[in-house]
Image (tube, rainbow, N blue to C red):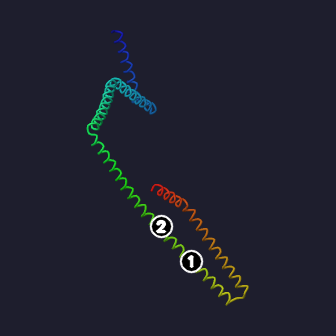
Amino acid sequence: MKHACEARLAAAEEEKRLALERQLLELTGSAEEQIAMREEKEKEARVELLRRQMVRRMMNASTANAWGAWVELWEAKTYAMGRLLEVRNRLSQPELSKAFGFWARWCEGESRKIVLSAAQERESRLAIECERLRGELTGDRTKWEAKVSTLSAERLRLLEEVARLSGGAAESEALLEVEREHAREERVELLRRQMVRRMTNAGLADAWIAWVEFWEEKT
């Protein structure tokens, strides 16, 4: 007991000395020493927290294990009782179970039919709208291309008339050649725009075709 008391006294003296040194550093130490001391205190606090958590877990380990075992037993018992009740119902009232199963499957089939019908109707409306818009776009494009061709022909005719009234054959031929070159450039530009538009909408067109094929196979 004497040796134990002496050891405890020495430990208390050492702790007191360390506390006095820390207090002295807090009062007279530099900023670096105070920061180091604060970090050491935080480290000791974290170590003490971890120690208390480990002790608490070790003390409550048996309680946690007992609770886990009880929950597993309860789940197994509940599952077994549920299966036994289901089997009893099927054995005692097989006609009712079959009727209920048939009714549930029939309701599920009807619900699927309603959903499929609504989806098909929506797809039909979208297809009709798409065809209408595509027809309008094609008609507008054809109309404007016809107008452009008419205006180009009218312009060419007017230039020929001007050249015939105001100049000789060579001059009129030069004007006509310039106009033909201009018309050729316009056609090239129109073809370029069409190609760019087709390349830009290629992904959309492929996606639409794939969706239509998928819808047809599903139907």
Residue at point 27%, 35% (across, down): 88
Q: Which residue is mark 1?
A: 146
Name the residue rendered at 44%, 30% in the picture.
36
When the figure is inspected, residue 108 is found, relative to residue 127, above or below; the finding is above
Helix, strand or loop status at disc 1? helix
Q: Nearer the viewer, residue 171 or 106?
A: 106
| Quarter of the image with the C terminus in it | bottom left
Determine whether, in the image, residue 170 is placed left or right of residue 141: right
| Mark 2 lies on residue | 131
Which comes sooner in the sequence, label 2 or label 1?
2
Give the percent coordinates (x, y) of residue 199.
58, 62
Q: Residue furthest bottom?
A: 165
Q: Position of residue 84 (x, y in %)?
A: 29, 33
Q: Amino acid at mark 1?
A: Ala
Return the residue nearer the eye: 127 or 72: 127
Q: Quadrant of residue 149?
A: bottom right
> Label 2 is placed on what type of residue?
Glu
The answer to whether 31 is drawn above or below residue 59 in the figure is below
Instruction: Give percent across and percent down for residue 81.
Output: 28, 33
> Given the current orientation, which residue lies at the most extreme front position?
95
- Alpha carbon distance from label 2 to label 1: 22 Å
* Mark number, residue 121: none
Residue at (49, 59) in percent of width and height: 212
Please name which of the two marks, 2 or 1, marks the residue nearer to the observer: 2
